Amino acid sequence: MIEELKDRWILGLRGTPVTTVSRSSEGSELTILLACGAELKISGTMRLTHGAATSPNAVPVAAEELDGLVGATIASAVAFKSGSLRVVFDTGHHLNAPGGEHKAAAHVRKTGDFDWSHKDGRGSAQ
């Protein structure tokens, strides 16, 4: 289920465990599969931190540590109409994909429930 607000969509993924994390061979695309059947795909720029990315105390997490998200549960998943995506995990990790970059793309799909995507600087939901 997706809830639309004025500037964002709340993606109905709270409490869902991560089952798989994979990166493309060149490392430019991240795919996260969830126990509910949803899939998150991000290509281009993304930032994984421990703590909120906007916090001065945020600790950047290396891409090699993404496998540590397997078994984590989503605490919050928000897609902004600007195209940005923010996913917070119960481990304290925050995954952010900026929306203003035309070289970045993100897609979050839960078959039969919702399909959100960002490409060319805009976010859209169905």
Image (cartoon, rainbow, N blue to C red):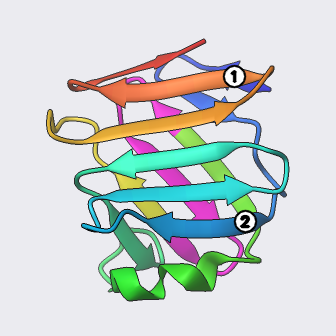
Instruction: Determine if the magenta segment contains residue 26.
Output: no
Q: Is residue 80 left or right of residue 25?
A: right
Q: CA distance from mark 1 to mark 2?
A: 18 Å
Q: Are marks 1 and 2 in contact (CB under 8 Å)?
A: no
Amino acid carrying mark 2 in the image: Val
Is residue 60 visible to the viewer in this orientation of the structure? no
Q: Secondary structure at mark 1?
A: strand
* Vertical placement of residue 68 versus 26, above or below: below
> Which numbered disc covers residue 91?
none
In the image, the segment drawn in magenta is: 79-94
Coordinates of residue 90 in the picture (x, y in percent): 71, 73
Q: Against 77, is 89 above or below?
A: below
Whether residue 83 is visible to the viewer of this picture, yes or no, is yes
Query: Where is mark 1, residue-wise?
Result: 114
Q: Is residue 83 magenta?
A: yes
Name the quarter where the C terminus is drawn.
Answer: top right
Q: Amino acid at mark 1?
A: Phe
Q: Secondary structure at mark 2?
A: strand
* Mark 1 or mark 2, earlier in chain: 2
Residue nearest the viewer, comparing 67 with 24: 24
Query: Which residue is the site of mark 2?
Result: 18
Tell me where residue 84 sits by quadrant: top left
Could you tell me which quadrant the N terminus lies in? top right
**Which residue does the image show at 78% across and 51% down from the upper left?**
14
| Residue 19 in the figure: left or right of residue 57 | right
The relative height of residue 24 versus residue 107 in the rendered view (above or below) is: below
Which quadrant holds residue 11? top right
Q: Residue at image x 46%, y 63%?
A: 95
